[in-house]
Amino acid sequence: MSSKKKYLCLAIAATILVGCGNSKTDGANDSSVEIGEVKQEGDSEEAAAFGEKTAAENPLSDETKSKLDALNTNYKKVNWDVVYSAPDNNGIVISETKFYDKQDSLNNILVVAYTNVTDAPVKFSCEGFAEDAAGEVAVDILESDIELGPNNTIAVKYDCENDEPSGNIRWNNFTVEPSDKEYVPYEISTELKQDSGYYCIEVEYSSDYDFNPDVCPHGYGYVLDKDGKIIGGDEEENWGKSVQLWAKSYDGENADTVFFKNIYNR
C-alpha cells in the first residue's frame, strides 16, 4: 500500500450513522430502482435488463421489500441497478450496480452489496461468478465468513477487467449462519480529499461504546454522482483511515460519498 499524507484540500463531506440501520443525513438520496425490479438498458426492446435473469430466479418477498424500504442508511443513497434476495435466504438482500473505472484501472467494475435486513447479526459465505452478456465468466466471486450486522451492508468491488458484467450472477453456493459478534451504534464521517493530483476518501469513526475499527475487516468507499450512481471507489487500504481512489478528476460529477463497513466491539 502506498503511504498516506494528511491533506488539507477537501471537496465534499458527509456524516452518517450506520449502526442499527440509521443515517444522520437529512433525506438520503433515494434514487434507487424500485425494490424487486430491474432497470432496462439500451434502446432495444429485446435487450435483457441488467441482472434480469438472476433477479427473476431470486425474487424478494413482500416482507423483505418492506424491511429494505425502511432502511435509513448509506444503502439508500446508491442508485442500484438490480435488487434481489440471496439464494434460499430472504434475510440477505443482494444489490448490484456497475461502472467503468476511467480514472484508475480502466476496467469494468461490478459492485455487489450484501444487506442484512434482519435484527440479528449473521455471517455468510458465497461462491459463484458474475456473467458477461454471453453468459461467460466475467469475474469469480468467493467470500468466506463475512460478518454482517443487523440492517447493515457491505458493498464489495469486483474487477471484471475487459468483460462488461451483465448483472447476472451464477450463485453456486450461498450459506448464512448466526454470528457471535456484538454490534454497537456508531457514526462514520467521510471526506473526499485531493492533493498531489489524486482523490481519497478519509474516514473517521465515533461511538458512545468502546470498539476498535482496526480489528474489523476492511470497508469499501465509493463516490456518487448527483443521481446516486457510483463513479469511483475502492477497498479501504489504510486500517480505519482512508480509501485511496487514485483518481485525478471526476469531471465535476462527484456529489457525495458513501462508506460501507461492519464494526463490532468483540
Image: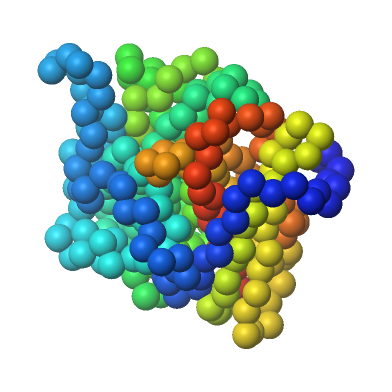
| Residue situated in front as seen by the camera: 253 or 205 | 253
| Residue situated in front as seen by the camera: 73 or 266 | 73
Query: Residue 188 in the image: x percent, y percent?
Result: 59, 66
Query: Residue 65 in the image: x percent, y percent?
Result: 21, 59
Give me the residue at 62% from left, 85% from top.
208
Give me the residue at 55% from left, 64% from top.
15
Query: Is residue 3 visible from the viewing direction of this image?
Result: yes
Q: Please determine whether, in this image, residue 230 is positioned above or below residue 205.
A: above
Q: Quadrant location of the N terminus?
A: top right
Give me the residue at 57% from left, 22% from top.
102
Query: Is residue 18 visible from the viewing direction of this image?
Result: no
- Which residue of the protein is positioned furthest toward the bottom in this rendering? 208
Give me the residue at 61% from left, 40% from top.
234
Q: Give the image quarter of residue 54.
A: top left
* Relative side of 2 to 255, left or right: right
Q: Quadrant location of the C terminus?
A: bottom right
Query: Residue 219 in the image: x percent, y percent?
Result: 61, 53
| Residue situated in front as seen by the camera: 215 or 96 | 96
Q: Give the image quarter of residue 212.
A: bottom right
